[in-house]
Image (cartoon, rainbow, N blue to C red):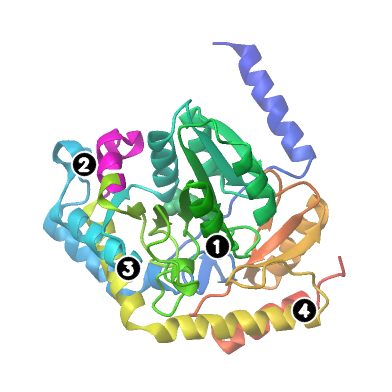
Amino acid sequence: MNIDFHGQLKAELGELEGRGLYRSPKALEGATGAKAAIDGREYLLFCSNNYLGLASDPRVMEAARNATVKYGWGSGASRLISGSQRLHRQLEQALAELKETPAAALFPTGYMANVGAIAALTSAQDTIIVDRLCHASIIDGCRMSRAKLQVYEHNEPDSLRRALNRSGKYRRRLVITESVFSMDGDLAPLPDIVNLCRHYEAILMVDEAHATGVLGEHGRGALELFGLQGEVDIVMGTLSKAIGSIGGFIAGREPVVEYLRQKARSYIYTTALPAAACAAGLTGIKIIRDEPERRRKLWENVTYVKEGLKALGFELLGGQSQIIPALTGDEAATIRLSEHLFRQGIFIPGIRPPTVPKGRCRLRITPASTHTQDDLDTLLDAFRTATPI
Ligand SMILES: Cc1ncc(COP(=O)(O)O)c(C=O)c1O
């Protein structure tokens, strides 16, 4: 046993704690919905990505239960061995339809979809140009690919253009952005980015993790909102947020999707999703298609909370999505505000570095379509009684 090694780790953990960066997540005791129980007390949950309440929708739960009875729980092997079940194929078909692409490939998580797709589609002869605020799964995929990584300034097409101008010598130029940024809640200028990629013949990948199910008339995502379906080479999404299940996917044309089935390591070298997760995903997608009123309610709730927080003097980022980041200053102030809310029965943990840049700590507030007017008023009351930041 190497005592020094353990000592080093303990010292680093102590240092994290000292800097207000140690994370001790709270354990929920029941289903994740508009409310959740923690240590025997009920809290309003305003931090989940379960935007439409589907993670605990009775129909989603029943679909998972029925599939478990029929197929068993575990899938037992990778998709390429004996793990592929008919439900995986059905779900891939439903995702392709949702995204209006010819095909889609399913991964166990959104993280794995990003990492696997980026690393499979690029190598040392290529360059990847990413928005500065892209999610860790995108950055990890870039590192694994060994392509030359370039970063452009957040949501600045001119900065992207300069990077593209410098990139003539590479075999492939892959541009990656999120459509809704997960921690800032703003939308990428997708029409400009699509035009630039077309002009420079670059490949475009858009992460629609937080847009799928929520944006666009039919909940297809930000590409639907902007009328850009069919204009993006690689559309990434996840089933773990608005759809209410778990799993990630890449949607696109057949060659991309088939290439990933043959080459993406996080598709090949891991056990397939349980059938129950696929059944839950299929049901979530159906509800998204059939119940647009959920999206309408979500936007009503989001607008109400945003206006209420602005009236209280909070500085909000974003503005165009369901994610409402309220800036809270340094780590200590963020923890203080989060603890104040917790005492009032509201659960919103502080978001701190390295998830967000230093000095840009925030509370990431996510109303859901399932929150009632009372829930929203309780939230705003709790913010009202907080000490000014
Ligand atoms: C922008 C973005 N991409 C990808 C992911 C990963 O998705 P998943 O949680 O399904 O692994 C997340 C969420 O964590 C995300 O916010």
Residue 259's disc is: none
**Spatial separation of the CA atoms under disc 1 and disc 2:** 33 Å
In this picture, is 120 found above or below 130?
above
Q: Nearer the viewer, mark 1 or mark 2?
A: 1
Q: Where is residue 310 in the image (x, y as percent from the top left)?
A: 77, 79
Query: Does the numbered disc 3 mark a residue whose Cβ is under 8 Å from ligand 1?
Result: no
Tell me the residue that label 3 is attached to.
98
As measured in the structure, the alpha-carbon distance from the residue carrying label 3 to the one carrying label 1 is 19 Å
> How far is disc 2 from disc 3 in space, using C-alphas?
22 Å
Q: Which residue sits at x=66%, y=80%?
A: 305
Res 39 visible: no
Determine whether 127 is above or below 350 in the image. above
Depth check, front residue: 209 or 82: 209
Amino acid carrying mark 1 in the image: Leu
Q: Quadrant of residue 389?
A: bottom right
Q: In this view, does 92 lie above or below 169?
A: below
Residue where numbered disc 2 is placed: 79
Magenta residues? 256-273
The local secondary structure at tag 3 comes to helix
* Cβ atoms at labels 3 and 1 below 8 Å apart: no
Q: Nearer the viewer, mark 2 or mark 3?
A: 3
